[in-house]
Amino acid sequence: MNIRESIDNAPMSRYQMMVVGICLAIVLSEGYDLLLMAFAAPELETEWGLSGAQTGVLLSSALVGMAVGSALIAPLADRIGRRRLTLYCLIAVVVAMGAAAATTNAVQLGACRVVTGLGIGGLVASLPVITAEFSPRRRRGTMIAIYTCGLPLGGVIGGVVVSSVMDTFSWRASFVIGAMLTLVLAVVVWAKMPESIDYLVARRPAGALDELNATLPKMGLEPLSALPEPEIVTEETSSQSFLSGRNGVRTVLLGLAFFIMMAAFYFATSWTPKLLQESGLSAGQGVSGGMLLNLGGVAATLVFSLLAVVVSSRKLAVAALIGASIAFVAMSTALGSLATALIAAIAVGVFVNASATGLYALAPDCYPTAVRATGVGWVSAVGRLGAILSPTLAGILLDRDWSPSSLFLLFAIPLLIGAVLVAVISLPTTDRARSGARRAAQA
């Protein structure tokens, strides 16, 4: 019995939807935790007398932690299991968020934010893998798209909650709320989330058969009398192979695509309100442009979830990156005119978020089980470097008299390069063989 093919061919059960729902709830919570500093920063500046540079370090510290967590912590999921790593990362975030509420200076808070980022980095790299592994192939892109909505929606919800809390209490209460929410989710993961079936079959830890037989019937599948034969270890499936051979090529191509996508994404989300204002619009109109960009992102993930049923994640990612390039060019020509700038902001939001969704949906398919979390973690880490560097680079160039239009144009060609990189990535042989077998069976 090939369990992976059984999951791909069976309808998605309520149990599988519950697992994906837990992943979505976690990423919603982590969106709150990650973006919390943006809402707390003004009060912190007043209370502690922070300079702009100190505030900037606090705002970026979690992103630095995320980059390190994606590279060094997420790969542990291939060794100790997806469920266990998720639980450990959630506990780390609980401790860091709770400790942040008790800090008395920027250094202490910055350290807590780095630890928070480490935990979130491990989560946001491993949760798409769990979502993909519990989803049938025909619904995988849809489930990843729904999952991807979680981070921006968590930030939106966090903004609403934090603004209400700060009117009555202080910024510390918002961190306590984040710690409590994450603690609840840690308990849910401990009580309800199963270990990844792909991991149990590939790694065969003690008690793997019992865990499989406890999970499979809940998914509408027959229990097993013995563990399936493990995947034959080849150059592509060795646990050390994500940087060698064909896997290494995939990691380089996908990592560069992630870097370009996240650089453009965080430039757009961080600087659009300010650049609209620099181009002659009012501060309120600039904020409106930023809000429309984010709303366009939510719409993009919903549309992607529908298209992913009939179109491959690779094709959608390529199309989204090309669309993002065109949208950035449009934005560069629309600045200064309120109506056209707001329309262009929506287009930028749609296509950069669709690009992110597409790459996160494609990434798990680029690696065999033995190196899946490791590979996704590393390409996510490379992407996080783009997220850290691009807002800083934009500020430096703006100080050197670059125009807002030139800054948007700067990202147009790299986005096209990203589309080419995604288009030439070859999927693992096992995936191509399965696709061929399915087409032959349907003929």
Image (cartoon, grey):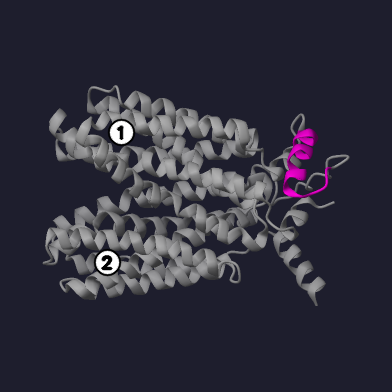
Mark number, residue 408: 2
Q: Residue at x 43, y 34 (%)?
A: 181
* Residue 13 visible in the shown view: yes
Question: Front-most of 131 and 206?
Answer: 131
In the image, taking residue 217 as reference, residue 285 lies left or right, namely left
Ranked by sequence position, the earlier of labels 2 and 1 is 1
Q: State the SS at label 1.
A: helix
Q: Which residue is mark 1?
A: 174
Question: Front-most of 62 and 90?
Answer: 90
Foreground mark, 2 or 1?
Answer: 1
Span colored in magenta: 208-223
Q: Give the residue type that dot 1 points to.
A: Ser
**Circle 1 residues within 10 Å: few <14, some 14–19, many ≥20:** many
**Circle 2 residues within 10 Å: few <14, some 14–19, many ≥20:** many
* Residue 130 visible in the shown view: no
> Image height check: is 400 above or below 311?
above
Q: CA distance from mark 2 to mark 1?
A: 34 Å
Identify the image quadrant of residue 331.
bottom left
- Position of residue 38 measured from the top left corner of the image (x, y, whole percent): 26, 43
In the image, taking residue 137 as reference, residue 214 lies left or right, namely right
Is 211 contained in the magenta span?
Answer: yes
- Position of residue 82 measured from the top left corner of the image (x, y, whole percent): 61, 38
Question: Front-most of 80 and 257?
Answer: 80
Dominant SS in magenta:
helix
In the image, taking residue 420 as reference, residue 397 lies left or right, namely left
Badges 2 and 1: C-beta atoms under 8 Å apart? no
